[in-house]
Image (cartoon, rainbow, N blue to C red):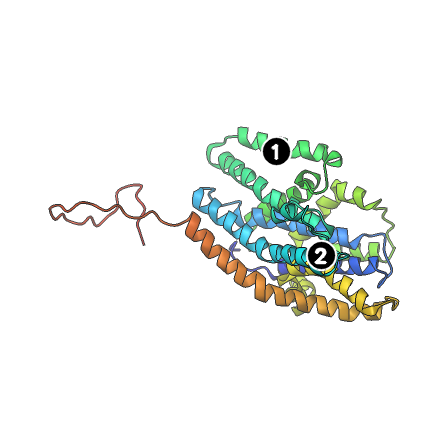
Amino acid sequence: MQQEQRIDSLTGIRGLAALLVVYAHLAEETFFTDTHLFPGEMGVMVFFTLSGFLMAFLYGEKEPNYPSVARYAISRFSRIAPAYLTVVLASYLIYNLVDPQFVYAISHDNLLRHLLFSGNVSALWSIPPEVQFYVIFVGIWFALRAFRTNSNVSLMVAVLGTILMLIAYRAQLPGTFVGSKIHYFLAGVVFGLVRARVGASVNMTTLAVLQAGVIGLLLAVILGILDVDLGSKRELYLTLETAGFAGIFVFLFSFDTGLSKRLLGNRLMMLSGECSFSMYLLNIPIIYAALAVMDGVTPRPVLAVPVIAITIAAAWAMYRLVEMPGNTLLRRLGTRLLLRPASAPVLPPGPPTTLATQASPGTPLQP
C-alpha cells in the first residue's frame, strides 16, 4: 500500500472519536444517562493514539532532512491553527464582551497562553499535548533514521530513554504536558511504523475476523457482559493497557476491509471524521447555547438529536469555511517562507560559454 493512499477507515475513526466526545458532553448535561465507561476520555485517547499512528505512518520512512521537516511543520501547523485560533479569538470576544459565563472562559489573563497552544480551558486542554507531541516526533524521526542508515543507537537510546522516563513519572506530570499522555502517542507510533511496513499481501479475511473480534469485545463491555473496572477518569488516562488497546484498535482498522468500510467508511462517519477537529472544538459551546435556549426544559435523549445535528452542521461549516481555506493559505505562506528556493546568483558579463547539459554530481537539477 502506498503511504499517500487515503484510508477511509482512519477518517471514520476520527469521526467515531469526535462523536464519543460529543456524547460524553451531552451525558454530562443529562441528555443521556452517564456511563462508567468514560466515552469522552476514550475518544480523546483515540485522537492521541491516531495522531502518533499517522505521524509514524506518513513520515517514519522518509528522510528527515530540512525540506521534509519543514513540510512536516507546515502541515501540522496549518492543520490545527485555523480552527483552533478562530475558536480561541471568538471565545475571547464572547467571554469579555457578550457573556461572562461563557463556557470557554478565555480572558485577558489567559489569552496569550491559548494563542501559544498552551491553554487549559475546558476541552482546549488537549491541544497542548498534541502540539508538544509534534515536536517530540521530530526527535523520534531523526532517531529512527540514524538507526536505520548508520546503525547509530545512541540517539535512539536517548529518545526512548526520555520517553520511558516520562511514562514512568506520568502520574506526577500535569495533564496539559505531553508526558502525562505520551504512552498513547507512543502506542500509535509503534503501530504506525508496523503499518508502514505491511503491504497489500495481508489477508483481508483474517483482518476482518480480528476486527469483528475487537468489536465483539467492545460490545461485551458496553452491554455489561464483561465487567471492566476502569477506575476514575485520571486512572484511565494513566493506564498503559488502554494505550495498548487503542494502538491495536487503530492498527486493525487502518485496513479497509469490507467490515471496516461499512462501520467506519460510511457517509456519516466520513463526514464526522473530516470535520472532527471542528466538532471537538465546537460541541461544548453549542451544548451551552442549547441549554440556554431550552431555558429550564429537562434534557433528554430526544432533545439531543437536534443538538448533535447542529453540532455536525456547524463543524462541517467551519471545516469548509475556516479549516480548508486556512490550511491552504498557511501551507502557501509556510512554503514560501521556509521552502523558497534560493535565488540564482547574478553573474557579471563574460565571454560566452557552452551550457552544461548534465548537472555535476550532487547538484540538484532545477525544475
Q: Is residue 189 left or right of residue 123?
A: left
Task: Report whether 158 appears left or right of 213.
Answer: left
Q: Position of residue 207 (x, y in %)?
A: 66, 56
- Callout 2 secondary element: helix
Q: Residues within 10 Å of mark 2 (few under 14, many from 20)?
A: some
Q: Nearer the viewer, residue 242 or 163?
A: 163
Dot label at residue 290 = none
Vertical comparison of 340 with 137: above or below:
below
Whichever of callouts 1 and 2 sits on the residue coming sooner in the sequence is 2
User: Against 311, is 41 above or below?
Assistant: above
Q: Residue furthest front?
A: 97
Q: Quadrant of the C terminus?
A: bottom left
Which is in the foreground here, disc 1 or disc 2? 2
Residue type beneath disc 1: Leu
Amino acid residing under circle 2: Tyr
Image coordinates for residue 196, horizontal then vertical, percent = 55, 49
Residue at 57%, 41% in the rendered image: 135
Task: Return the residue at label 2.
Answer: 95
